[in-house]
């Protein structure tokens, strides 16, 4: 089975500054596919297409197709799947889950968009101070994402949102990774970061998106960005170092990577949208659903 991918995007005229030497992190060709807690029963109309999808993609990519098939053929399955999907959306995970009936990623789509959604917080910054830094931010992301086998340019990176999270108040922030068992129950919680912000400290929340041509590139980069969440020394965080080099940060310790999530979207000509454009000085605002992940075993 083959999958259409967006055409390769041209490299911008302005070349990003040389990137800092990254900490070597292996990029796997693929990652274990998250699976929903339940799947269509063998012999039901939804089973073959869903199984085919899950051999390549994860539960987040396949669930809209499952919902669409179940909605057309089996109301009981649709209700169960929709309920499960809504429950899974409350969990913090590694892929973006949409609980609307849709299409499976397949050769029937005109193209398939592979995108990586990464949320970060920047201490001591605000939405106002961030204005004008969007291009440098995108250049830093493109720079550390590129390697000998993958070229990422600034037109493949855009800012989904940038907003003040804390302004003139004191609050505690926690970043959690939640794993689920096959029944969808939370089986472990790992706390990555625990901070207490002093009065008057500002915190900027930025979510940015990187677009890829292949699913392997998406998964490999997701593993790389995910590894940066576990870096203990700020000076070893490739993204933080690159943002300092571009003048977006004044110190590597300002940056915390909160989440890294993958998203696979089939695109059809009738409603295709160009989401790859990056406009300097403009925030592209999109509604993003909370994602989920399940134990693949």
Image (cartoon, rainbow, N blue to C red):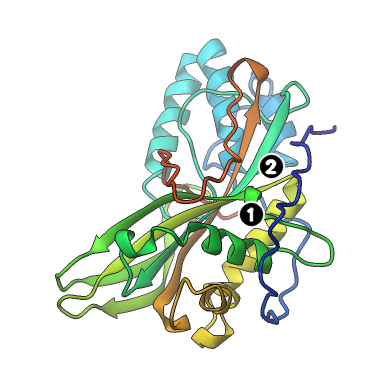
At 46% from the left and 62% from the top, the residue drawn is 133
Circle 2: is it few (<14), some (14-19), or many (20+) Cα within 10 Å?
Answer: many
State the mark number for residue 57. 2
Q: Is residue 31 visible?
A: no
Tell me if residue 71 comes above or below residue 244 in the rendering. above
Q: Residue at the top extreme?
A: 72
The numbered disc on residue 264 is none
Q: Position of residue 180 (x, y in %)?
A: 48, 55
Q: Residues within 10 Å of mark 1 (few under 14, many from 20)?
A: many
| Residue contact between numbered discs 2 and 1, judged by CB atoms under 8 Å | no
Q: Quadrant of the C terminus?
A: bottom right
**Can residue 286 be seen here?**
yes
Q: Nearest to the eye among marks 2 and 1: give it.
A: 1
Quarter of the figure with residue 289: top left
CA–CA distance between discs 2 and 1?
Answer: 26 Å
Picture coordinates of residue 100, whole percent (x, y): 47, 26
Q: Secondary structure at mark 1?
A: helix
Residue 117 to residue 169: above or below: above
- Viewer-nearest residue: 290 or 185: 290
- Image quadrant containing the N terminus: top right
The residue located at (48%, 57%) in the rendering is 134
Is residue 264 depicted above or below 143 in this figure? above
Image coordinates of residue 213 in percent, x first then y, are: 75, 44
In this view, 100 is above or below 90? above
Viewer-proximal residue, 256 or 124?
Answer: 124
Q: Secondary structure at mark 2?
A: loop
Between 139 and 261, the residue placed more toward the observer is 139
Q: Report the residue at 65% width, 61% height from top.
A: 142
Instruction: From the viewer's perspective, tell me whether residue 35 is left or right of residue 32.
Output: left
Pointer 2 or 1: first along the chain: 2
Residue at image mark 1: 154
């Amino acid at each position: 089975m083959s999958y259409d991918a967006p055409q390769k995007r041209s490299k911008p005229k302005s070349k990003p500054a040389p990137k800092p030497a990254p900490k070597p992190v292996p990029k796997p060709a693929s990652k274990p596919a998250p699976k929903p807690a339940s799947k269509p029963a063998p012999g039901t109309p939804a089973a073959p297409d869903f199984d085919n999808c899950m051999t390549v993609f994860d539960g987040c990519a396949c669930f809209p197709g499952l919902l669409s098939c179940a909605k057309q053929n089996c109301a009981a399955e649709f209700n169960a799947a929709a309920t499960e999907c809504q429950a899974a959306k409350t969990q913090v995970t590694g892929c973006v889950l949409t609980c609307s009936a849709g299409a499976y990623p397949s050769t029937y789509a005109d193209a398939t968009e592979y995108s990586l959604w990464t949320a970060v917080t920047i201490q001591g910054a605000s939405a106002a101070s961030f204005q004008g830094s969007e291009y440098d931010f995108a250049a830093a992301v493109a720079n550390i994402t590129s390697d000998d086998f993958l070229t990422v340019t600034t037109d493949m990176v855009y800012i989904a949102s940038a907003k003040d999270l804390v302004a003139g108040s004191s609050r505690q922030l926690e970043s959690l990774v939640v794993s689920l068992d096959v029944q969808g129950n939370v089986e472990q919680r790992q706390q990555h970061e625990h901070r207490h912000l002093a009065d008057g400290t500002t915190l900027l929340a930025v979510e940015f998106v990187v677009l890829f041509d292949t699913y392997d590139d998406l998964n490999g980069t997701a593993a790389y960005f995910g590894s940066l969440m576990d870096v203990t020394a700020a000076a070893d965080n490739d993204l933080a170092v690159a943002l300092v080099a571009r003048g977006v940060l004044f110190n590597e310790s300002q940056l915390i990577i909160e989440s890294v999530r993958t998203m696979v979207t089939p695109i059809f000509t009738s409603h295709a949208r160009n989401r790859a454009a990056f406009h300097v000085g403009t925030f592209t605002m999109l509604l993003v659903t909370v994602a989920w992940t399940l134990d693949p075993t």
